[in-house]
Amino acid sequence: MMRFMLMVSLVIGMCGAGSVVGADKPLVVEVWPGKAPEETGNIGAEMVRMSPKLDRKQVEVTEQTRLVTNVTKPTLTIYRPAKDKDTGTAVLICPGGGYWDLYWQLEGEEVAAWLNSIGATGIILKYRVPRRPDEIKGEPARRPLQDAQRAVRLVRSKAAEWGIHPDQIGMVGFSAGGHLAIATATSFEQKTYEPVDDVDKISCRPDFAIGVYSGYLKAKDKDEIAPSFHIPAGTPPVFLAHGGADIISPPEHSVLMYLALRKAGVPAELHVYATAAHDFGVRPSDHPCSMWTQACANWLRHQGFLKPPAQPQ
């Protein structure tokens, strides 16, 4: 118990430095040079609010946390690790929220802090939410995929400037954000918007993808992946984690995606944690699901993405 409480104190302290990982404020850059594709900009001002209170049967983290919504101008918020730990790997973070909101604190800032702790740059993608009227309720919204593809290209274009290896850029997403990460990893051959500048000549294929309690991966009423997915040759390695008792996004979403990836010859790893619900983020707890971050870090090391930084001669 003492060891667990020390872990909690450490990570909560790390996450409370939170949005301020490192001495400097994080760099924030706009994803698009002008108005985003298909953006009308008439949904009201961007706002921050608290998440709804849910019970333990629905989610692992029941306390209210900060959400962001009414996003019309997507941005990247960049948190760098300490120089002596920096591996040159960067991970775009896609918070969840059903394509209605972004769980900015639980699945954004806290995730960036965890990534910094293992030597990776954490980059929170503020993609467009909520769904627009022409996007079908119950289906993934299409505009966030435009934002995600552009974000991968933009990070790769800034790799030298930001101290990132251009072939070590991955994605991690939670719930709907998990869908967005996997969709980006499998749709790099798909044109979702008209090019706007030279950045759009750069590859939008992430080098790895991590989906955590992802939704929208399973077809409705069928034990197969959603028909919107095609897994092309060259799909990058994928790590999947899910709660076995998730009633918001049942574990079949990740299980069926794992099987489809395996059939397509894509390196994939799957962890399903019995009795775990939705929304566990990266917070430590006495439930085994909180250890997914350790398993993921080990996977990233095995894939070669967390090599120690070169020592000075």
Image: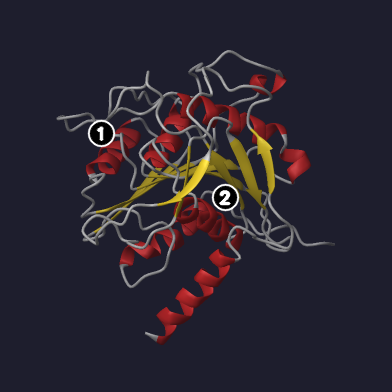
Given the current orientation, which residue lies at the most extreme right position? 313
Tell me the residue at 51%/58% (across/down).
110
Quadrant, the C terminus: bottom right
Q: Is residue 165 visible?
A: no
Residue 216 appears at what percent x and percent y? 30, 34
Quadrant, the N terminus: bottom left
Q: Amino acid at mark 1?
A: Lys
Q: Amino acid at mark 2?
A: Gly
Mark found first going from the N terminus, 2 or 1: 1
- Residue 218: mark: 1
288 with respect to 19 (left or right): left
Residue 83 appears at what percent x and percent y? 74, 60
Given the current orientation, which residue lies at the most extreme left position? 221
- Residue 304: mark: 2
Query: Total of numbered circles in the picture?
Result: 2
Pick whichever, 243 or 261, lies toward us.
243
Given the current orientation, which residue lies at the most extreme bottom position? 2
Q: Is residue 210 above or below residue 295?
A: above
Query: Which secondary structure, mark 2?
Result: loop
Residue 247 appears at what percent x and percent y? 21, 49
Tell me the residue at 32%/66% (across/down).
288
Tell me the residue at 63%/38% (across/down).
167
Q: Is residue 279 above or below residue 129?
A: below
Pick whichever, 76 or 264, lies toward us.
76
- Residue 156: mark: none
Label 1 crowd bin: few (<14), some (14–19), many (20+), radius 10 Å: many
193 with respect to 2 (left or right): right
Residue 297 appears at what percent x and percent y? 50, 58
3D distance between C-alphas at marks 2 and 1:
30 Å
Q: Is residue 291 visible?
A: yes
Pick whichever, 278 or 254, lies toward us.
278
Tell me the residue at 36%/44% (across/down).
175
